[in-house]
Amino acid sequence: MRVNRLDHVNIITDRLDETAQFYATLLGLERRNAPPPLTPDNAQWMHDENGQAILHINSVDCPRTYDRAVAPGAETGAIHHVALACTGHAELMARIAAMGLTCQTNHVAAIGLTQVFTTDPNNVLLELNFFGN
């Protein structure tokens, strides 16, 4: 057994449309309806350019196989942040400015990494990583 890659991150929200729009606008992810039995009113999946659904965005009342208490808008509990490997640093910074978002940037010179930290409408902390930018 081995782990091949991160498959997806699931976000439970009481702001489904706003959250899906945020990821489409900031990261250029393609919004699609989740497969049945989920509906467009309770689940949207955000796909990368290869068609991989990397974010599953579900409403609070969306049916879940494994259910547990979630408080949308609260800090993300034991999960500190979600990190995504990205390209196009200048374009991201322009999008952040256009969206009026705040962010924090960190440079890790030893490995040629630029990190951009920002939060989504649900207070999920994103770490957007750019190697060699």
Image: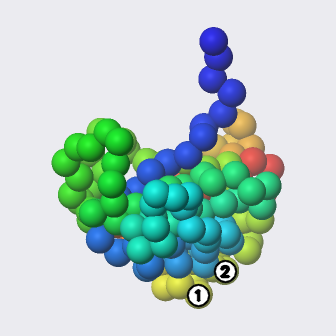
- State the residue at coordinates (33%, 60%): 62
Residue sitting nearer the eye, 104 or 68: 68
Q: Is residue 27 visible?
A: no
Q: Is residue 78 visible?
A: yes
Residue sitting nearer the eye, 127 or 44: 44
- State the residue at coordinates (67%, 69%): 30
Q: Is residue 32 left or right of residue 124?
A: right
Instruction: Indicate whether 118 appears above or below 6.
Output: below
- Are there few (<14), some (14-19), or many (20+) residues within 10 Å of tag 2? few
Q: Is residue 120 left or right of residue 69?
A: right
Residue 74 on image: x %, y %: 23, 59
The image quadrant where one finds the C terminus is bottom right
- Given the current orientation, which residue lies at the most extreme front position? 37
Q: Is residue 94 left or right of residue 67?
A: right
Residue sitting nearer the eye, 101 or 133: 101
Residue 4 on image: x %, y %: 69, 27
Instruction: Tell me the kind of residue under disc 2.
Output: Ala
- State the residue at coordinates (66%, 80%): 94
Instruction: Indicate whether 83 appears above or below 120.
Output: above
Q: Which residue is mark 1?
A: 98
Q: Which residue is mark 2?
A: 94
SS at mark 2 in the image: helix
